[in-house]
Amino acid sequence: MKAESGKILIFGGTTEGRTVAERLLAEGLPCTVCVATQYGEEVLHPHPLMNVHTGRMDRVGMTQMMLEGHFSCAIDATHPHAQLVSQEIRAACEQTGLPYLRLQRENADSESPESSDKRAADDKSGKQSCIYVTDVEEAGSFLSSVPGRILVTTGSKELARFTRALGDPSRITARVLPSPESLQACAGAGLTGKQIFAMQGPFGTDMNCALIRHAHASWLLTKETGAAGGYPEKIEAAQKCGIRAVVIRTPSTENESRGTVLPDSFEPSGGAATMNLTDAVQDPQRESARLAGLEYIIEKARQYASCGKKKAGIFSLVGVGVGAQEAGTQQAQEAIASAQVLFGAKSVLENLTKTWQPAACKKVIANYDSGKILDYLQEHPEIRNAAVAYSGDSGFYSGAASMLAKLKMAEAFKENFDVKVICGISSVSWFAARAGIPWQDWKILSSHGRFCNVTGQVRRNRECFLLLANAADLRQTGALLARAQDQGTLGKLQLIYGYELSRAGEQICPCTPQELIEVTQEGLYVLYIRHDDAEKIPVLPGMPDTAFIRGKAPMTSSEIRTLSLCRLGLTAKSVLWDVGAGTGSVSVEAALACPDSKVWSIECKKDALALLAENRAKYSLQNMSIIEGRAPEALIDLPVPTHVFIGGSGGEIGSILDFVLARNSSAKVVVNCITSETLTALYDALDTLPIRDLQCVQVMVNREEILGTYHYLRAGNPVFIISFQGDGKTGD
């Protein structure tokens, strides 16, 4: 999508705006000139290459015009006192990626604050001839404290604000443009016909003097507008008539300094640059400066118009918050309002229609599939501004993650679209504010369409926040927590659930696990869980053997289990295969230590399988799965392991290791060997396997026991603990 060659957008019905438009049109560059009033359109000379837009716009309207007009750049030539308008233009340019040029009249021809002090005694009374103020309210406040009639030459836009600050509109005679809007503003400010001069400038010193005398004015109110606004002639007339002027200074901005030309530092890819147009006032050097400034603007506009580069469209991934319009940021609302097409889940779009009413969207499509959205935009090149609405925040369990992953591989798409990710207020921050609880230490969880080890996370974390799918999910969570409390896995809990956050039926309700089981009202839920006993849970392995339900099946003893788990070096999101799990002590302790991990316990003996199930239930382990069968056959359908513990191999140690390293050539493995046969078979297999970091220790544990009145050590069987890792060079 290329910008139309030479098409330039100009904001401002000012003298500067007309000047730059005339120059660009004379060079054959088409322009669209935006003016606020019908009068602003009337003073423009018609031209076949010029379109005129009449009427005030906010940034949404400006953004829409920029996107639909295929402009090469925008020139802001609005009045120096129209700061809010300039901010809106700049924001619209940033949102659309359109290059922004600021053409601002310079105030060097008016007095600086320093020079004004030097004129303090130019009449017989020794009073200053000019009083400087920052705005119309300050001007009104000052003039309300002094007597005399006032000639107001600041226009009609802020006339009502001035009269309110002054408190007496009968003292005012206003000079305004001869337009219906200006006359209506005068009437609204309380001025009658004899108080109004409806005239079109420019005005010389003599005309200003005549108006001052006709109005019997003791004061002249003006803005520091530079020569283009007739400021020097106003001040000279006030001096000749022996009255004083109240001057509203030109507001300075972040990027614009008074009387300064900023350097040529902007690039044709967009962004903002600011230039000042200096007007000549009885000084030949100033005329040269004015022409140089104007030529600078023309040259930059010409560069943008002729570069012919691709103009990026806007593709916004918008987090719309938890539901209500106030939960979405202003940036999110603007992105949706300016979009030509809006995508999203049906429920999200329906809520937007009810609450946000994004009437500016030309098309709404109920689809949140990332691939299909990109395909649609590729098939419709006329779309230059698209948005996808995601519930909550775009970075919090959002479909925006899937879209961003797709975009990484869509190079052609990114050449045509500038991708923006816009945040929304998440359910976390909204709930925390409503409940009055700081959330910086919360463990954030979600069981909405995904597995979540709720009891394991609550056991380890003092404060958890859980996103839930529906009322059934809430009830199931309550049952899990209640069972874990009954079994002693969890201590005392403080629960608060949130229902339909930000919406009409919002509820923030403290409750117990048992009360959660009884909730039936359908809707969107979140759950806050505080478990103070989590801080008492040991962070290292070392559970005693008595912590497990025992039977005839073998069990790795506490000391051997602790050393083996340390050698395994489990990480936060490990996938552990416990082959020959027996009673399940290794599986249970690994699952408890790493609640974000997944443990697969493989066992073929019936009595051991029963014990595995009992010990899993005892600790409410959602992240531990039991697989019945013999390895390696029972391993075929399991997810790829990061870690493998082999406590029993059934004589298949070589085949098991071959299978493990074929699935993950970098897997970390720990094997416990009690018999010489297993140890010999293991070393025979290791001779041919691609491994590294082989370590072997032999451990024998002696435990003190009491025999009558004596204490003696009972020797345990010696165990070899062998650890190694695949070299990562082979397998999947």
Image (tube, rainbow, N blue to C red):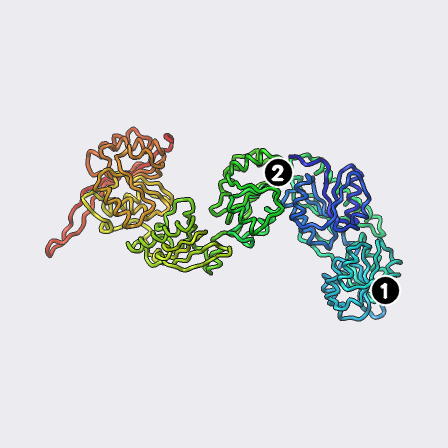
The spot of residue 687 in percent (x, y) is 28, 29
Q: Nearer the viewer, residue 494 or 258?
A: 494
Residue type, numbered disc 1: Ala
Would you name the residue on which mark 2 appears? 383
Query: Helix or strand or loop: what does disc 1 sit on?
Result: loop
Q: Nearer the viewer, residue 543 or 353?
A: 353
Which residue, as the protein is rendered here, is positioned at the far top?
Answer: 688
Q: Is residue 202 visible?
A: yes
The spot of residue 544 in percent (x, y) is 24, 51
**On the rendered structure, is 411 left or right of 245?**
left
Picture layout, residue 425 above or below residue 648:
below
Residue 215 - label: 1
**On the rendered structure, is 83 left or right of 450?**
right
Quarter where residue 650 is shown: top left
The spot of residue 306 in percent (x, y) is 71, 35
Q: Which quadrant of the rendered structure holds the C terminus? A: top left
Quarter where residue 159 is shown: bottom right
Q: Nearer the viewer, residue 507 or 683?
A: 507
Q: Which quadrant of the rendered structure holds the N terminus? A: top right
The spot of residue 132 in percent (x, y) is 75, 63
Quarter where residue 108 is shown: bottom right
Q: Residues within 10 Å of mark 2 (few under 14, many from 20)?
A: some
Picture layout, residue 644 above or below residue 358:
above
Picture layout, residue 239 above or below residue 525:
below
Q: Nearer the viewer, residue 502 or 396?
A: 502
Q: Residues within 10 Å of mark 1 (few under 14, many from 20)?
A: many
Using the numbered discs, state the Cα–Cα distance from disc 2 to disc 1 in whole angstroms. 57 Å
Residue type, numbered disc 2: Ile
**On the rendered structure, is 199 left or right of 731?**
right
Q: Earlier in the sequence, mark 2 or mark 1?
A: 1
